[in-house]
Amino acid sequence: MTATPRRSSYHHGDLRAALLREAIDVSRTSGPHAVTLRDITRRAGVSVNAAYRHFADRDALMLVVAGHGQGMSARAMERRLDALHEPAGRDRMRAVGLGYIDFARAEPGLFQAAYLEPVDRARTEDPVAYGDSGRTPYQLLSDALDQMVVDGSLPPERRLHAEVPAWSAVHGFAMLVVQGPLRELPPEAVDALSERVVDSIVVGVTQV
């Protein structure tokens, strides 16, 4: 049997980074469920046993991939936020929601890895998921909600755990676009629906 050639991107002593790059590539092209240690090590040109010196198992590897994806998601949100001028809390909330959808549409495989692989909410504040501002996607959402309270557009009694319904709604829409029946819509239709969904979320979190 012919041996699998080593990838040109792999350098001895940097196997962890090489395995991570391969897992990110597979997640991007085929989705996170296509990632296996056997395939990733084959692509890197090493044995499966070699991977265990860097990752305890596939789940450990995919948690790092998820963090990478969340960091990219945060940067998509930050691009929307950076385009605002003296934004109120509602504007920041809209930017965060639309940035989340932007990332899902641009990187559907990594989006699924970022938000389907983590097993507990505590990882939504992991530094590995920071964007350029040093904030994770969840923290950017929290910041927008806090600003809405400061602005007076979100009643303080509605602030507690407001991240959950807001996140759930925008994630559900993003999944319909990425994997569900909305994936066949033309881009301009998704653009318009994204705006409408995010506006509905902003209104929804404020209502008693």
Image: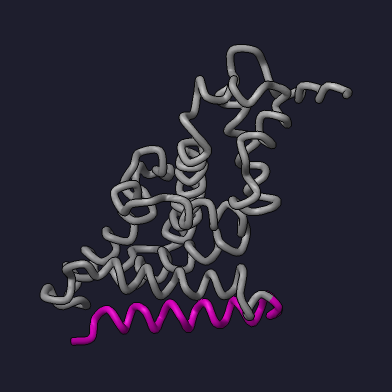
Location of the N terminus (image quadrant): top right
Q: Position of residue 45 (x, y in %)?
A: 73, 23
Is 62 situated left or right of 24 in this image? left
Q: What stretch of residues is rendered in magenta?
A: 184-208
What secondary structure prevails in the magenta region?
Answer: helix
Decide which of 39, 166 is in the foreground and name it.
39
Decide which of 100, 133 is in the foreground and name it.
100
> Is residue 6 positioned above or below 150 on the image?
above
Magenta-colored stretch includes residue 185: yes
Q: Position of residue 25 (x, y in %)?
A: 66, 42
Residue at position x 45%, y 69% in the image? 171
Residue at position x 52%, y 24% in the image? 52
* Farthest right residue in view: 2
Q: Position of residue 10 (x, y in %)?
A: 69, 21
Is 76 situated left or right of 177 in this image? left
Q: How many marks?
A: 0
> Is residue 50 positioned above or below 111 on the image?
above
Decide which of 99, 92 is in the foreground and name it.
99
Decide which of 118, 176 is in the foreground and name it.
118
Magenta-colored stretch includes residue 115: no
* Farthest top residue in view: 12
Question: What is the quadrant of residue 37 in the picture?
Answer: top right
Residue at position x 59%, y 12% in the image? 13
Location of the C terminus (image quadrant): bottom left
Residue at position x 48%, y 62% in the image? 99
* Farthest bottom residue in view: 208
Question: What is the quadrant of residue 131 in the picture?
Answer: top left
Is 31 situated left or right of 200 in this image? right
